[in-house]
């Protein structure tokens, strides 16, 4: 991701997170996600890094589960429903306080209540900064 706007890089995480996982862990689409998350884990903006960590944890969780399904012995030993739920809850506890999807809702509400239909990137950035305080 080479966009100068952190909001654009952050929005990519929302797009990736809202799409279904590809069928195969070895597929080009899955590997693209891995590369993008790896890049965004090093992003200079904390909010982007935090959501990238969360999304990467979800992707790793899904990959582990799919591998366990392929290896029935591992599935019965390590990915019981209770273990899977507990692992998922642990990931959810690490969810950032504001993901891009949360920003979309909050900013959409702000625009609605202020009878606004458009905005600038600067205004959106200002809104994000106000949410941090």
Image (tube, grey):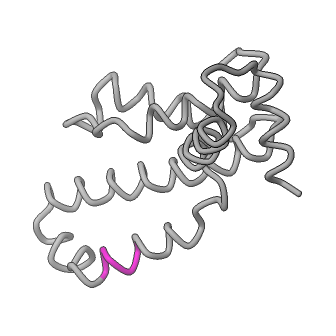
Q: Using the image as rendered, state which of residue 66 and residue 119 is in the foreground.
A: 119
The quarter holding residue 124 reads top right
Residue 52 visible in the displayed image: no
Residue 63 x, y percent position in the rendering: 33, 51
For residue 85: magenta? yes
Residue 8 x, y percent position in the rendering: 66, 23
Whether 82 is drawn above or below 72: the answer is below
Q: Relative to 106, is 72 on the left or the right?
A: left
**Quadrant of the snapshot with the C terminus:** bottom right
Residue 83 visible in the displayed image: yes
Q: Using the image as rendered, state which of residue 62 and residue 70 is in the foreground.
A: 62
Magenta stretch: give its range: 83-87
Q: Using the image as rendered, state which of residue 64 and residue 43 is in the foreground.
A: 43
- Secondary structure that dominates the magenta span: helix
Residue 52 x, y percent position in the rendering: 60, 44
Name the residue: 64% across, 43% down: 113
Whether 52 is drawn above or below 2: the answer is below
Residue 11 x, y percent position in the rendering: 58, 30
Q: Relative to 49, is 67 on the left or the right?
A: left
**Quadrant of the snapshot with the N terminus:** top right
Q: Relative to 104, is 24 on the left or the right?
A: left
For residue 88: magenta? no
Q: Count the numbered circles shown.
A: 0
The quarter holding residue 18 reads top left
């Amino acid at each position: 991701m080479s966009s100068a706007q952190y909001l654009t890089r952050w929005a990519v995480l929302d797009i990736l997170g809202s799409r279904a996982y590809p069928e195969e862990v070895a597929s080009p689409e899955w590997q693209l996600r891995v590369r993008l998350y790896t890049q965004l884990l090093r992003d200079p903006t904390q909010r982007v890094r935090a959501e990238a960590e969360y999304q990467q944890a979800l992707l790793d969780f899904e990959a582990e589960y799919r591998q366990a399904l392929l290896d029935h012995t591992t599935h019965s030993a390590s990915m019981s429903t209770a273990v899977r739920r507990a692992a998922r809850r642990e990931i959810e506890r690490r969810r950032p306080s504001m993901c891009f999807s949360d920003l979309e809702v909050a900013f959409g509400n702000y625009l609605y209540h202020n009878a606004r239909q458009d905005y600038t990137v600067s205004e959106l950035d200002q809104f994000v900064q106000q949410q941090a305080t």
